Image (cartoon, rainbow, N blue to C red):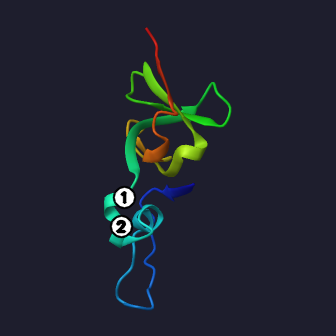
Amino acid sequence: MARIEGLRCEPEISAQSPDLWEHPLVERLVPDPTQLSSLGVIKLTGFLGRSAFPDCKRLYRDADLREWDDIPEVMILCEYRSGVGRNMLDKDVVWIDRSRAGSERRGQFP
């Protein structure tokens, strides 16, 4: 799983086109740009935290922290953490493998 830290991204120079660089998110999630129809990625947003289940991360859907998904770490392809020094209500973003969707556990606090 790759972590994209804040807005840091450094251009990568390609041998095919020295002026073209690929964004780290695209590089991680689109291994073959000719196969976009089979792109199996789902983007989720919320607030990442510890899960009650081993090998999972909990993603709270909003700042009320009353609804969440416990996501197995093997499903997570990439994550963007809003990070320290930013607005504490900025959401984290997690991209998961669509082929494993349904493996996550949903929870709700009354």
Question: Is the residue marked by circle 1 packed among few (<14), some (14-19), or many (20+) residues within 10 Å?
Answer: few
Task: Using the rendered image of the protein, determine whether residue 97 is visible from the camera's viewpoint.
Answer: no
Q: Residue furthest top?
A: 110
| Circle 1 SS class | helix
Location of residue 73 (image quadrant): top right
The residue type indicated by label 2 comes to Gln
The single residue placed furthest to the left in the displayed view is 37
Above or below residue 89? Residue 10 is below
Percent position of residue 36, x then y: 33, 63
Q: Are marks 2 and 1 in contact (CB under 8 Å)?
A: yes
Residue depicted at x 39% and y 69%: 23
Pointer 2: what residue? Answer: 35
Looking at the image, is 76 positioned above or below residue 12?
above
* Relative side of 20 to 77, left or right: left
User: Where does the image place residue 108, in percent across and percent down from the top left?
Assistant: 45, 16
Task: Check the image and report above or below for 2 versus 87.
Answer: below
Residue type at mark 1? Ser
Q: Residue at x 41, y 65 (%)?
A: 30
Residue 16 seen in this snapshot: yes
- Give the number of the disc on residue 38: 1
